[in-house]
């Protein structure tokens, strides 16, 4: 176990157990916590999450964690967002009316249409799907060990639409709709898919994240 | 792209992996954890664990199996059987499940679907529908492994669970389940076209062409398979039957059950050959 301490932020949503298992497997020293003190003292943060955007933001605000997370990220500590944890980093969501996010990155969260070019589309998008490169080079990212078009596990009804496309690390195509499937900007790395549910390829992302940010 | 998921289904009774026909007459096949790991390592896209006797006893007893397997299996795990309340759901999610699947509880209290999907997100809530054919194009919903008649029409119920917030539907043909005679295409196709959420076809897949049919003709988004994989994996998985409780006579007599060389990888190769995308 490394000495660096990673806090998996617990705000009462999502399967934190598997994120913790992935951290353990690659040798990260992690703890699941909703304590402000733990987060303030963390060397890196993981923001997981499955569920509803507004409910998640409400929980973060109620626990007093929203301002601390922003403070830590602005100080430059690494943050790894997963699924809803990616979406929460953006400005706002269209889910159940408009809700404000952490607003660390400008952009909005949009819902998949249930019809595209006259073809019905199943929502949620629940499937293994491929990730491919955007304009951003991924050699310096936690994806550096992966080939293009590897399969990752997706389960979501909403996707992010960043205002500044330079943060887009990978894209994915669901029934003709191309969306941003991961981002990297400064010390933030986040994925729409679940690396902890994407078998060995997913675990390699945890491993590379730990290596790049010197957390082992 | 749109990819099809292959989901081995593990029916569990007490400490054992079991398999029946029409959801009844359970035979002991081995230890669930051995099969789960084997399927994970051989290309399963997800796994589902069903506590098949839980509804009878009113509780789900899979917590130990979930937390044990979730430590070494990094694909989604769905858990079902005997889940009745928000706190039951919380408990299995905390043990390491990613999704929960329920049937009886949803019939008894449809509002649970709404409540659970608001709290955990639609994508966490899978509704199982056990269908028995009554007449041409008429199917009735059953619960408790096809034992209890509900008087509810399958197609109406499928639409209703979507509106209530379910993220996926597992449609089981009780008539075909365990028979390995093929999927009830009409049933799967109807449900899949009625709802806008993913539909998982379950019951009857016994060879690769059944699987291709369920996707091409039935428009299934995923396939849930048990018999075909279990019986073909028996000789490759070393569960010691002498340690197993229950009706393990089948296993003792069939340890070298004739294997047709059917595997998850083989199935996926066949799907790709038929222009059906899936993870390889």
Image (cartoon, coloured by chain):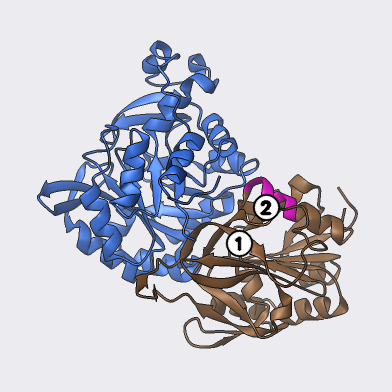
- Image colour for chain A is brown
Query: Does residue A38 sit above or below A116 in this rendering?
Result: above
Mark 2: secondary structure: helix
The residue labelled by disc 2 is A202
Tell me which segment is drawn in magenta.
A199-205
Q: Residue at x 45, y 14 (%)?
A: B255
Q: Main secondary structure of the magenta part?
A: helix
Expressed as whole percent of the image width and height from the top left, the position of residue B169 reads 35, 57
Q: Closer to the camera, A78 or A142?
A: A142
Question: The chain coloured blue carries which letter?
Answer: B
Label 2 marks a residue whose chain is A
Callout 1 environment at 10 Å: few (<14), some (14 to 19), or many (20+)?
many
The image quadrant of residue A212 is bottom right
Q: Nearer the viewer, residue A25 or B52?
A: A25
Q: Chain of mark 1?
A: A
Tell me if B225 is positioned left or right of A95 in this view: left
Sequence order check: which comes first, mark 2 or mark 1? 1
Secondary structure beneath dot 1 equals loop
Query: Which image quadrant for residue B144?
Result: top left
Against A165, residue B194 (above or below) is: above
For the residues labelled 2 and 1, say whether their Cβ atoms are less than 8 Å apart: yes
User: Residue A166, image x and y in percent?
Assistant: 73, 79
Residue at horizontal 35 percent and vertical 67 percent from the top: B196
Side of B72 relative to A42 (left or right): left
| Residue B16 at x, y percent in the picture | 46, 29
Image: A163 above or below A111: below
Q: Do we see residue B278 in this rendering? A: yes
Do pointers 2 and 1 mark residues of a single chain? yes
Residue A122 is one of the magenta-drawn residues: no
Residue occupied by mark 1: A193
């Amino acid at each position: 176990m490394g000495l660096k301490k990673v806090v998996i932020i617990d705000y009462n949503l999502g399967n934190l157990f598997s994120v913790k298992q992935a951290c353990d497997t690659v040798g990260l020293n992690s703890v699941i916590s909703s304590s402000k003190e733990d987060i303030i003292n963390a060397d890196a943060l993981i923001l997981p999450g499955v569920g509803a955007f507004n409910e998640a933001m409400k929980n973060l605000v109620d626990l007093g964690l929203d301002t601390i997370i922003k403070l830590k990220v602005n100080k430059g500590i690494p943050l790894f967002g997963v699924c809803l944890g990616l979406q929460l980093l953006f400005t706002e969501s269209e889910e159940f009316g408009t809700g404000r996010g952490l607003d660390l990155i400008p952009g909005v969260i949009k819902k998949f249409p249930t019809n595209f070019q006259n073809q019905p589309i199943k929502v949620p998008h629940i499937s293994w799907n491929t990730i491919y490169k955007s304009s951003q080079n991924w050699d310096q990212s936690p994806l550096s060990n992966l080939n293009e078009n590897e399969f990752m596990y997706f389960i979501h009804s909403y996707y992010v639409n960043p205002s500044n496309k330079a943060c887009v690390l990978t894209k994915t195509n669901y029934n003709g709709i191309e969306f941003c499937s991961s981002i990297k900007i400064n010390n933030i790395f986040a994925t729409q898919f679940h690396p902890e549910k994407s078998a060995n390829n997913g675990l390699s992302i945890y491993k590379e994240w730990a290596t790049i940010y010197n957390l082992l | 792209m749109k990819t099809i998921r292959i989901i081995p289904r593990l029916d569990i009774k007490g400490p054992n992996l079991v398999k029946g026909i029409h959801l009844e007459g359970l035979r002991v096949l081995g230890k669930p954890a051995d099969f789960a790991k084997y399927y994970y390592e051989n290309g399963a896209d997800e796994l589902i664990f069903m506590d098949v006797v839980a509804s009878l006893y009113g509780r789900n007893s899979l917590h130990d199996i979930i937390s044990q397997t979730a430590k070494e299996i990094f694909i989604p795990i769905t858990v079902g059987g005997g889940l009745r309340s928000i706190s039951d759901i919380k408990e299995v999610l905390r043990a390491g499940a990613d999704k929960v699947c329920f049937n009886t509880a949803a019939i008894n209290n449809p509002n649970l679907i709404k409540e659970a999907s608001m709290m955990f997100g639609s994508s966490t809530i899978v509704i199982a529908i056990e269908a028995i054919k009554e007449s041409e194009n008429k199917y009735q919903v059953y619960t408790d492994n096809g034992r209890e008649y509900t008087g509810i029409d399958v197609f109406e119920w499928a639409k209703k669970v979507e509106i209530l917030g379910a993220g996926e539907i597992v449609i089981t043909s009780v008539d075909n389940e365990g028979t390995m005679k093929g999927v009830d295409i009409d049933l799967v196709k109807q449900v899949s076209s009625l709802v806008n959420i993913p539909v998982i076809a379950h019951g009857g897949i016994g060879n690769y062409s059944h699987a291709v049919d369920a996707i091409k003709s039935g428009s299934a988004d995923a396939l849930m398979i048990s018999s075909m994989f279990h019986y073909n994996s028996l000789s490759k998985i070393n569960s010691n039957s002498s340690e197993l409780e229950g009706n393990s006579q089948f296993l003792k007599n069939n340890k070298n059950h004739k294997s047709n060389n059917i595997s998850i990888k083989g199935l996926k190769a066949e799907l790709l050959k038929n222009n059906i995308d899936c993870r390889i």
